[in-house]
Amino acid sequence: FDFTKFLEILRTKRAEPIAKYIRSFLISFSKKQWTVSEQVKLISDFKKFMSAKFDEFEPFSTMASVELENCHEGLEKLIMNKLYSQCFSPKIDLKRLDQSHREDLTKDEVVKEKLKQFSWVELAHLDIHFEESDTFIDMAIGELSKINNYRAPRDKIIVLLNCCKIIFGYLKQTSTEGSADSFIPVLIYIILKSKIPHFVSNINYIERFRDGKHLSGENAYYLSSLQGAVNFIETLDKDGLTVSEEEFDLHFAEYLQREEDELAAKEQEERRRKLEAEAPMPQRLIAGIGARAEERVSPSGVLFSSAQILGNSISSFLSPPASSGSSPRAKPIGDLDDNDEEDVQERQAMEASMAHRKDAFTSTYRMLRSMFPDLDKDIVKELVVVRQGNIGDCIDVCLELTNGN
Amino acid sequence: MSIEDPIPRFAQFKLVLLGESAVGKSSIVHRFVKDSFDDLRESTIGAAFLTQTIKLANDTTVKFEIWDTAGQERYKSLAPMYYRNANCAVVVYDITQLASLERAKNWIKELQRQANADITIALTGNKLDLEAEREVSTGEAQQYAIDNGLLFCEVSAKTGDGIRDVFYRIAEQLPVEEQIRSTMSRSKPRINLNKPSTNTDQGCAC
């Protein structure tokens, strides 16, 4: 799948009618906050509509099926990237949340609490008795945590599949049969250790907005497994684990203590902030200098910021009230250039990761070595370079190599 | 494909695999997939999800999407995630463990209550190679299957005995013709002579 290629095609003169349809869809979609079921229907109807338009307009109508498929994928990614802040529950403006979005967030909170409560769980508590490998666990968690970095449903599900692939690599290394009996507990364990936020929102978002024809077979299986694992955690209690009464009580007491400490710290922080806000200017200055050395406020800083406040209030009088749309955007939503703020962020993150590519190569190499100790060192090294350190691809090849033996 | 080509007669079904963890339910599937010469496996992630096609008479290909489940009691609540929309289920017990049959019966009750109404269920006794340690008589399990409208097989994943049979007998019960007819009528208006077909990922068998 080549997103850039799709965007390039979209920018050509011939594709102008198609670009126009997309633009006007994005604009009208953003005019209102729809309910979840409306969103799902609107987006799926629009994809169907565009599918017919692809058949009608050049250059799409004469494309080979592979290229056309690339455009369908591109379309989904483009519109979901643009509509993320209206469709992914944690990103939606609180005032515009639909009932179902709210439910996503409530469940996210429940799971978050459970992850805190059960952070002590080990594989043995899930009746998995093979050696834990930090490399694997870290790698799987690292992969899964990318799920919140991506906005397109396709990208999110690829993250999940890669994580599952790493788990199967791990099972293979421990000579465990790669069946659901061992896969599910390890997946649950990875989620418990990951502390990744918004699992429920992510799963529902993928189910709602990933094109149905791609949510079948293997993809559906692993998405259902993630969903099952998260549901399990959502209702997890002592009976879900193999643990003695004493051990559980001990961990539970520790959890309560942590919660209490956290709450106390939060309250203290709030009190301090309130005090600062109420204090007249000079005292605020002193508090700033005294309490937080790292955020020391200089006198000129204070003057400058208050001047700014004044300036803002004047300019807000002079400028007309902001038009519809609650989130301020650098560019209008209908702008199809993939350059808005979040895109830039995504790209920057990608560039940063390029800088760390060498590290990634090394860690992939190390991981593969520990997963497949029998494979020749140089072959693994070469493989990592050829496959650009892509962990999923590398594991595939290694599994093939070892299966052949 | 051009319009003159014979239309492949192809149907695809979701099969869910249930049973206690030590009864060897995954081994049954692995044996089935390994023994099939027709190598159309598309599993890329791992062995918990496998696909396997079988050829029936009159040039019909049936593809099974096989969904493995975790058999441990504590993951019982995950099962509905897996059997929703399943067309068929293989519920496995171990002929040397009476308790595993009881567990299988519970799965069957749950499926009949909550899964698709027309689901085809095959009660399958594994470990036929351990005849000497048998605890569940063939007659007892078979009678239960008859009373509840299930297919019944005894197999050995170890020797391969009876494995193929399970899947072929399930295929016979599935609404193959119905699915082929509905796919054909659905895909008809989409035939476009100017460009290659776009719905090849539905798994054409050619």
Image (cartoon, grey):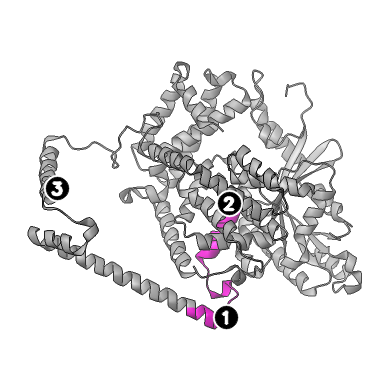
The residue at which mark 3 appears reads as: A305
Percent x, y for residue A12?
46, 19
- Sequence-wise, which precedes: disc 2 or disc 1? 2
Q: Which chain carries label 2?
A: A
Q: Is residue B157 left or right of residue A175?
A: right
Q: Is residue A177 above or below residue A249?
A: above
Q: In this view, does A180 lie to the left or right of A236?
A: right
The residue at which mark 2 appears reads as: A163
Q: Is residue A199 above or below residue B94?
A: above
Residue B13 part of the magenta-drawn span: no
Residue closest to the far right:
B132
Q: Does residue A54 show up?
A: yes
- Give the residues in magenta: A223-250
Which of these two is toward me, A386 or A71?
A386
Q: Does residue A280 show up?
A: no
Residue type at mark 3: give it. Answer: Ser
Residue closest to the far bottom:
A246
Q: Which residue is drawn at 43% across and 28% down?
A: A22
The residue at which mark 1 appears reads as: A244
Is disc 3 in the same subunit as disc 2? yes
Residue type at mark 2: give it. Answer: Cys
